[in-house]
Each structure stands twice: as C-alpha cells, then as structure tokens.
Image (cartoon, grey):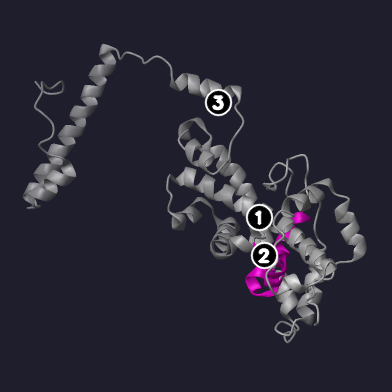
Amino acid sequence: MEQLQSPFAIPHEDIEALNESDGFCMLRSYLARNAGFCHDHSQCDEQIRETWMLHRDILHALLMPVVTLFRRASALAEAALCTHRSEDLELAFAGEARGAFLCLQCFLTEEEDWCRGIGCPACVVSATLSTESHIRLTIAASLLSTASIASPASTPQHEELPNNRALPPLPHILPALRTALAADPFWSDDSDMWPYLLSRATQLSAGIQSLIAECTNLESLVMSPISARPTHALQKRGITFPITPFANAIQAEEKGVKLRKSKLAKRQLRLKDEEIELMRRVALQCWVQAKVPKQVRVEVLGTGKLTRARSLTCP
C-alpha cells in the first residue's frame, strides 16, 4: 500500500534549527500528549507519523499566538463596550484592526479546533490546503512570526509556554506551502494563486499588527480609573494585570470616607433640580398645546413623580 505523505517538505537544516529552540522543544513535548492518529493514517510507518506530528506542531506554534490574540481582543472589547454580544465586539476597533478582528472571528468560530491542532495530526496538516482561508491565515501567521514591528511586549504569547521560552520565527512553512500548492491538483491549475494568496495574507498580517496596537490602547482605556468595571470580564477569560501602587491608590480612594455635603452644596443641588422641573413644565405646556397624548407626556417627561416642595427660586 502506498504510504500517505505530508504535503509539506521542510529542509532538514531548518528542522535542526527548530529543534535547537527550547521553546519549540517544550511545545513539542506538550503536544506529544495528543498524538492519536485516525484509522486511515495510523497505517503509516513510524517515521511518516513523526513527520506528520512535526508539521502539526509547526502549524500549532504559528496559529495559537493568533488565537490567543483574538481571545485577548475579544475580552478587552467586551470590557470596553460592556456587552457579551459577539456581533457588537467589532465596534471596539477601527480600520484595518476591525477587518482583522472580523476575519479572525468568522474563521475561529468554525475552525478553532484546527488552529489548536486538535484531532489526528495528519488530518490537521492536510486541512491546511482545504480552503483559501486556511492558507491565508497560515501565511499571515508565518509573516507575523518574523515581523519586526511587533515588540515582545505587544506580541501575543503562546498560552502553553512561559514568557521566557519564546518561540523562534517560523518562516519555514512558506516555501513548503508554496510547493505543496503547486503540487496539489486542486490549486495547481491557477498559476496566479500564490501571488494572490500572499497579497491577501500580507493585508491580513498588517491588520493583525494593527489589532495588536489597538489592544494595547484598549487595555489602557479599560484599566483607567474611570472604567474600573471591566476587570471581571477580563479575569473570566484568564487575562490579568499586575497590581501597581497607582491601582492600589485608586482602590483606596474608591473605598474612602464619604463626604458630607454642606448647606450651600445642598441648596445648589435643589436649585438645579428646580431648574430641571421648570423646564419640564414648560415642555409639558407646549406639548399640551400641541395635543400630545397624555401617556406619551407622562412617559417622556416623567410628570407626576415629583412632590410639590417649597421653592427656592419662586416666592
């Protein structure tokens, strides 16, 4: 029986360079727990199965930081907008960042298991060539891994690795992916497919970089003293922030002793309330002349809710 081969061919020297990375070796050790092959691919010999697992691990190392970034962006958007409606979260971003967020949201809703490498390693690797979206995200993730614009502080970290075990750049998949597309019967008919996919992936990569920058700004917004409410929404998604003396001072201020209002302050508040009540009466008189239904007047102006008290502005 002919052995099923991986569609990707990565040079041996590139594999050796990856194996010298402590972060990549740690990731491979973690992913080795999920090494179950399906019935069709379990018939392959051990060397071919090892190749499938290596390519699955490379894809996982590429895609999971993008998944982690999307989760962080979603949590920050929830906190900033005070909503759990997924269709509203895009409003927290603008421009290329919003386009990248929408693209990731649509794709991960259907294909998060593939991004996480869940299932048969051979099936996960083979699915990379299944749709244009899979290929475009793989290329964009590879471009992101080598992008110098993303600083270590803003680059999404891999959730299974400590911060001091960063993954190396992973451009090795690009020539292997291009060769696989040229050899694939479905994709090889169009000679312009690779330039088109690379152009689209470059746009997506730029959008994800904009999303990283906007997440940094959004994080500063939701952690400001004015909006201390989003902390719980972020903690539910596993996103925490360091406790700083400034944050402690804010909490101490919020829990401080309540101030007593002076007589002058109380009088000014009553004057403000009476001014609002006078404006409501003027509006009510105008609406009566216009024959606006009584029920509408009550609902909009709130008539009948305030009791008559001694006026400070009228004798």
Q: Circle 3 — which element?
A: helix
Q: Which of the 4 image quarters holds residue 264?
A: top left
Q: Nearer the viewer, mark 1 or mark 3?
A: 1
In contact (CB < 8 Å): disc 1 and disc 3: no
Left or right of 82 on screen, residue 203: right
Q: Position of residue 198 (x, y in %)?
A: 73, 70
Q: Is residue 82 above or below residue 96?
A: above
Q: Position of residue 116 (x, y in %)?
A: 65, 58
Q: Give the residue pinned by disc 2.
A: 137
Viewer-side residue, 311 vs 198: 198
In contact (CB < 8 Å): disc 2 and disc 1: yes
Q: Is residue 148 visible from the viewing direction of this image?
A: no
Viewer-side residue, 55 vs 257: 55
Compare marks 2 and 1 and give the one earlier in the sequence. 1
In contact (CB < 8 Å): disc 3 and disc 2: no
Query: What amino acid is at disc 3?
Result: Ala
Left or right of 158 on screen, residue 18: right
- Pointer 3 local density, CA inside 10 Å: few below 14, some 14–19, many at least 20: some
The span picked out in magenta is 119-148
Q: Is residue 260 visible from the viewing direction of this image?
A: yes
Query: What amino acid is at disc 1?
Result: Val
* Residue at the image position 16 percent from the left and 40 percent from the top: 302
Q: Give the residue pinned by disc 1.
A: 66
